[in-house]
Amino acid sequence: MIPEEVIEQVREAADLVGIIGEHVELKRTGSDFRGPCPFHGGTHRNFAVIPKKGMFYCFVCHEAGDVYTFFMKKLGMDYPTAVREVARRVGITIPERGGPIGGGPDPREPLFAAVATAADWFARQLRESPDAEIARKYLASRQVTMEQAQVHALGFAPRGTAFLDAMKGLGLREEVLLDAGLIVKPEEGQGVRPRFRGRLLFPIHDMRSRIVAFSGRVLGEGEPKYLNSPETPIFHKGQLLYNLHVARHATRKAERAILVEGQFDVLRLSLAGFEEVVAPLGTGLTDDQAALLQRHTAQVVLLYDSDDAGLRATFRAGDVLLRHKLRVSVATLPEGEDPDTLVQNKGPGALEQALKDAVDVLERKIQILERKGFFGSLPGRRRALDRLLPTIRAAADPITRDLYIARVADVAGIRKDVLQREVDPKETTPTAPYRPLPPPTVTALPSNAEKSLLLLMLSGEPWHSRVVEAVDAEQIEFPVYRAVFEALADDAPDRLDETAARAYEALQAEGLGNEPPDVVFDRSVNWLEARRLDREIARKQQEIDLAPEPDKARLTLEKKALAHERNAKRPSWKILEHARRKGAPGS
């Protein structure tokens, strides 16, 4: 088979206009080229070649694709032959690996064919079906023309059984539609039904520009707001980025990628001329998605919403990207704006200015912490460090990490070498072996306070907001509870995996109990803080053990101060036992 990276190299080197121009008389129209369609034999210039997207599209017969698709559809080539022909034209030699091409058909081919057939049908519904009037009006309200929707292959999934009837009429077998994630079988004994009903559909492409899945936005009432295709043999949502099949060309040219939260943000920015824009597929950014970006650019600008949920998603994505040695900056939008509304209300110039004003992801964290007054007190500075440390540790590039350590040491007013040890406790003095830190001495089980805080969040406002403000996800040690905490903080419990979802349901069933919420809140936050202080005391003791004699007295005083602060936070055994006897949530 042909290596994927070579297929991509050949595609990028190909002169799409020149190749198609051998078969079609093309004339420039703005940044695109137009001519009569070579597929349906039209005489009007309804056929567009769009070099910046690396694609062609006919607005009459709706044939579309890239340079390989053109050879396949125009000259009847199979995919490997089309790749070889384009490679020959651009002078690239194709190495072989994994045996000869044509050594057997791809067993997934029926799934690719089924999804492609469904995409064509959905697109036709959006253009022609009376039932799709709601989708056409919605697009018009978002200032998206039908021509723009067609170029981006948007579709509409009607309610009812029309999709099932159409696919069966085209000869597609039920088991293939199930495997492709296009239909679902709710329970044994019940019939199948379409997965997407009453939704505007965004097609999701793989890196070969094949449609492999869909993301559907509900129109009218219904949940969830966006519904993705399930995991299938041809679709793994954590390994693809929406629009990367187009944006990869632009990211190299622009020397950056713009990462936004959703498909409509991608569409709006693309229509405004920002081609280097991509989005994750309804979940937090994954390591596989970051690795994909790292193959195409060294710089990523995060352009998420600027509300609290958007900021949390921004910093989580930033840490993932830093682990892959990418440079990460954050663009800040005016209050109340998201990328879509900013372009609609103020034009592309306002967005370009926001991108130019983007600051490094760590610097953005520091700005927010400074605005909230964290650096004005010793406890606040300690909490600020807790929030900055995950980003420092995520920086895999050694120069970036060193710069981060120097910046945070300066803003927090601590020595750089002390912060270095906090970032990586294993980097101790070479004259003494590293000693593992003893376990914390907090007497209550760590999950008890964490559980209480989750129960508070589930009880509604104002406790949900108070917990999110007081606690960082990194302070939640039990991984399942941390996942629930992050999902609740973002108001997205539907993204939980099976294990975390069961914990979430159990917490909902349990409820907060009769103890006053303010007592539960104070006790739980204090226990988390006491646990952190226990670790600080253990680290301080390690410093004492390794320090020269003149420094021991000072370090011992610092340890005593920490112990005094810790003891002020920790409830007495009597209070804890009383809570246990009452069956309080924090017990």
Image (cartoon, rainbow, N blue to C red):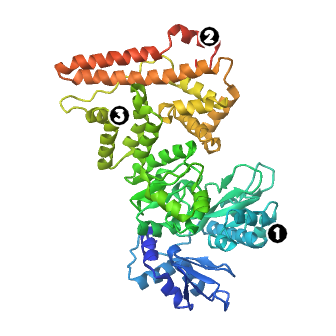
Q: Nearer the viewer, mark 2 or mark 3?
A: 3
Q: Quadrant of residue 555?
A: top left
Name the residue located 46 percent from the left edge and 56 percent from the top edge.
301
Tell whether 38 sits left or right of 407: right
As displayed, is residue 537 above or below residue 49? above
Q: Quadrant of residue 557?
A: top left
User: Can the viewer see residue 207 in this picture?
Assistant: no
Q: In the image shown, does 211 or 424 lie closer to the viewer? A: 424
What is the three-letter code of the residue carrying label 2? Answer: Arg
- Which residue in the structure is indicated by mark 1? 130
As displayed, is residue 383 above or below residue 79? above
User: Can the viewer see residue 266 in this picture?
Assistant: yes
Helix, strand or loop at label 3? It is: helix
Name the residue located 77 percent from the left edge and 73 percent from the top edge.
128
Q: Nearer the viewer, mark 1 or mark 2?
A: 1
- Which residue in the structure is indicated by mark 3? 412
Tell whether 527 sits left or right of 557: right
What label sits on residue 581 in the rendered view? 2
- N-terminal-most mark, 2 or 3: 3
Tell whether 147 sits left or right of 420: right
Name the residue located 63 percent from the left edge and 27 percent from the top edge.
455
Q: Position of residue 255 (x, y in %)?
A: 40, 64
- N-terminal-most mark, 1 or 2: 1
Tell whether 65 sits left or right of 258: right
Mark 3 to mark 1: distance in Å? 62 Å
Q: Position of residue 547 (x, y in %)?
A: 21, 23
Helix, strand or loop at label 1? It is: helix
As displayed, is residue 435 above or below residue 273? above
